[in-house]
Image (cartoon, rainbow, N blue to C red):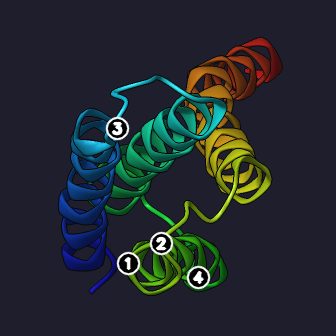
Amino acid sequence: MVKALSIVAIILSLIGLLATIVFTFVVPDGSFTLAFFLGTISWSLLLWSSIIGYQLSASYKLEEEQYKKVGIRIYIIIVAFILFFFVGLTIGLIISVAIFVTLWALKSNYDDWEKSEPEFLNDIAEKNNDAL
């Protein structure tokens, strides 16, 4: 379920990023404003967060609680996309950074755990061999 929602969030984030870029070129003066840069950064972070959410749900063995954490962040990305079209503004850099940081931290924790796990098992095997 989370994997499918992550794909939806990736697609919606791409649409939000492209819409921000297109809207900037449609503006009468064609000027690049602070809103353009903030919108582009926000949607880029949300896109990256969506990709991390997909990686977490597809490639990692998460516990039920971790799936819920990832799922909630994916739902927030989808809600941000919906609000983007109703409000007409990006949801904000703060929300996108917060989602990105939490998903990145969760992914890096799992990456660190997977790297340290073989060493831990090797230490146990060495202790067992020493005991024999």
Callout 3 secondary element: helix
- For the residue carrying disc 4, how many other residues have a C-alpha within 10 Å: few (<14), some (14-19), or many (20+)? some
Residue type beneath disc 3: Thr
Looking at the image, tell me whether mark 4 or mark 3 is earlier in sequence order.
3
Q: Which of marks 4 and 2 is in front?
A: 2
Quadrant holding the C terminus: top right
Callouts 2 and 1 close, C-beta under 8 Å: yes
Q: Label 1, on which residue?
A: 85
Is residue 91 depicted above or below 43 in this figure?
Answer: below
Q: Which mark is residue 58?
A: none
Q: Label 2, on which residue?
A: 88
Q: Label 3, on which residue?
A: 24
Quarter residue 128 falls in: top right
The number of numbered discs placed on residues in the rendered structure image is: 4
Please report the residue visible at 50 percent of the width from the left and 82 percent of the height from the top.
83
Callout 4 secondary element: helix
- For the residue carrying disc 1, how many other residues have a C-alpha within 10 Å: few (<14), some (14-19), or many (20+)? few
